[in-house]
Every structure is written in C-alpha cells, then in structure tokens.
Image (tube, helix red, strand yellow):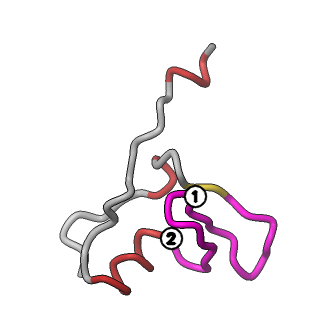
Amino acid sequence: MIAERINCRKCKYYYITWDARMPHGCKAFGFKTRLFPSVVVYQSSGQTCQGYAEKNQNAKLK
C-alpha cells in the first residue's frame, strides 16, 4: 500500500473531467482515470507520484 497517500485534489495538475466514466485527470502526466491519478501512478510504477505540486491557494483569494 501507499506509504504516504497523496491527495490529488491539492495538486495543481489535478482536474475534474467532463467524462463520467473517467472523472479524474492529471495534466502533468496527461491522462484521465476512474481512480485518483496518484493511485494509478502507484499501481503502474510502484512509486508515489513524482509530479505532485501543491496548489497555490493564495492565487484564488485575489
């Protein structure tokens, strides 16, 4: 299992898609999925997501 679970919703590359079958997307790696992208990355490579970058929350307040 994942040692440190990554919350994709806090990543600047995460987005919600319009595709009901594949509702989660990752702009860093360019794919859509049913699961959170960090879970798919871990299942595929055995490593935690290397593309994670935290969103800048202050930018939304302006």
Crowding at dot 2, Cα within 10 Å, few <14 / some 14-19 / many 20+, comes out as some
Toward the top, the furthest residue is 62
In front: 25, or 2? 25
State how many labels appear.
2
Element under label 2?
loop
Magenta span of residues: 16-35
Q: Main secondary structure of the magenta part?
A: loop
CB contact under 8 Å: marks 1 and 2: no
Left or right of 51, for residue 36: right
The image shows residue 5 at horizontal and vertical percentages of 30, 65
Element under label 1?
loop
Left or right of 42, for residue 27: right
Check residue 36 in the rendering and tell me which mark sits there, or answer none. Answer: 2
User: Label 1, on which residue?
Assistant: 27
Left or right of 43, for residue 61: right
Calculate the distance from the C-alpha at mark 1 to the C-alpha at mark 2: 13 Å
Which residue lies at the image location 61% right of the left edge and 80% below the top edge? 34
> The N terminus appears in which quarter of the rendering?
bottom left
Q: Residue 45 lies in what quarter of the image?
A: bottom left
The image shows residue 55 at horizontal and vertical percentages of 47, 38
Q: Amino acid at mark 2?
A: Phe
